[in-house]
Image (tube, rainbow, N blue to C red):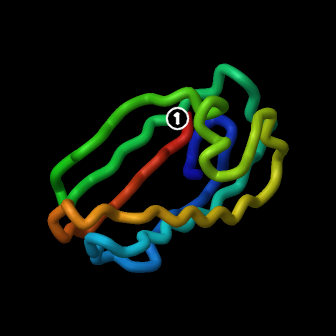
């Protein structure tokens, strides 16, 4: 969660920045929701590999928050989220820098 119309200051990070194939990747994020987030809210999702942009797309936030065990409407407050991903053995070793500024 990051700056945007319904959110405040926040940050995200990785427990293991190496992105080692075949291992778990733990992504954490902390942010403040300033006003209720309801259906129709969108977020710009951006994933980079170093300076190379791998993904940049606008997604429907309420359709995706179930991936971090939330559901809309999202009430104001501070949220501290952690998500664990299993990286496949087939990927090359990478360093990942995800961003998701709200809008």
- State the count of labels: 1
Whole-percent x and y of residue 27? 49, 66
Q: Quadrant of residue 24?
A: bottom left
Left or right of 89 in this view: 4:
right
Q: Residue at x 62, y 30 (%)?
A: 63
Q: Is the residue marked by circle 1 packed among few (<14), some (14-19), or many (20+) residues within 10 Å?
A: some
Q: Quadrant of residue 62?
A: top right
Point out the residue furthest to the top here.
40
Relative vertical location of residue 46 with respect to residue 87 in this rendering, above or below: above
Left or right of 58 in this view: 94:
left
Q: Nearer the viewer, residue 51 or 49?
A: 49
Q: Residue at x 23, y 45 (%)?
A: 54
Whole-percent x and y of residue 12? 51, 64
Q: Quadrant of the C terminus?
A: top right
Whole-percent x and y of residue 28? 55, 67
SS class of the residue under badge 1?
strand
Left or right of 21 in this view: 15:
right
Whole-percent x and y of residue 46? 36, 44
Relative vertical location of residue 88 with respect to residue 41 in this rendering, above or below: below
Q: Residue at x 42, y 52 (%)?
A: 99
Judging by the rendered image, the residue that carries numbered circle 1 is 43
Q: Nearer the viewer, residue 90 or 28?
A: 90
Q: Residue at x 58, y 52 (%)?
A: 1
Q: Nearer the viewer, residue 13 or 70?
A: 70
């Amino acid at each position: 969660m990051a700056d945007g119309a319904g959110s405040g200051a926040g940050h995200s990070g990785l427990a293991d920045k190496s992105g080692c194939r075949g291992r778990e990747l733990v992504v954490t994020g902390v942010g403040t929701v300033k006003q209720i987030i309801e259906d129709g809210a969108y977020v710009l999702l951006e994933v980079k590999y170093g300076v190379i942009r791998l993904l940049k797309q606008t997604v429907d936030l309420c359709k995706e928050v179930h991936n971090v065990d939330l559901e809309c409407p999202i009430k104001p407050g501070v949220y501290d989220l952690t998500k664990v991903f299993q990286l496949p053995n087939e990927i090359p070793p990478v360093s990942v820098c995800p961003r998701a500024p709200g809008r």
